Image (tube, rainbow, N blue to C red):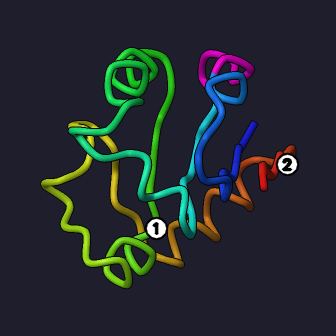
Amino acid sequence: MLHLIFQSPIETAILERIDSGDVVVFLENAVLRILQNGLLSGMLTQQLKRNRLCVLSDDIVVRGITADELVNGIEVIDYSELVELTVNNPVIQSWA
């Protein structure tokens, strides 16, 4: 399953509902919550052990965030990679 998280702040209940092997993409203002020094950094680090976590490159650039400010292991992807994820995951859950 592909999870698209737009919500900011991100509720921990959402992250707890993500099954092992699911892919997560953080979009829009949700990218502000996936920083290394953020409140969710520990939880996201644990989540990376069982999930692929991604962020859309344009969303971090617009907000003045660099890839090295993100929790280590979160992948920066572009629009074509996002499209590929949507094609490869027939079930998509949006969290707004």
Residue position marked by numbered label 1 in the rendering: 56
* Residue 22 to residue 29: above or below: above
| Magenta span | 16-21
Residue located at (34% from left, 60% from top): 76
The answer to if 20 sits in the magenta stretch is yes
Identify which residue, 39 or 56, lies in the foreground: 39
Residue located at (60% from left, 41% from top): 10
Single out the mark in the foreground, 2 or 1: 1
Identify which residue, 9 or 18, lies in the foreground: 9
Q: Amino acid at mark 2?
A: Pro
- Residue 1 picture quarter: top right
Q: Secondary structure at mark 2?
A: loop
Residue located at (72% from left, 60% from top): 86
Numbered label attached to residue 90: 2
Q: Amino acid at mark 1?
A: Leu
* Residue 2 to residue 61: above or below: above
* Residue 36 to residue 4: above or below: above
Q: Quadrant of the C terminus?
A: bottom right
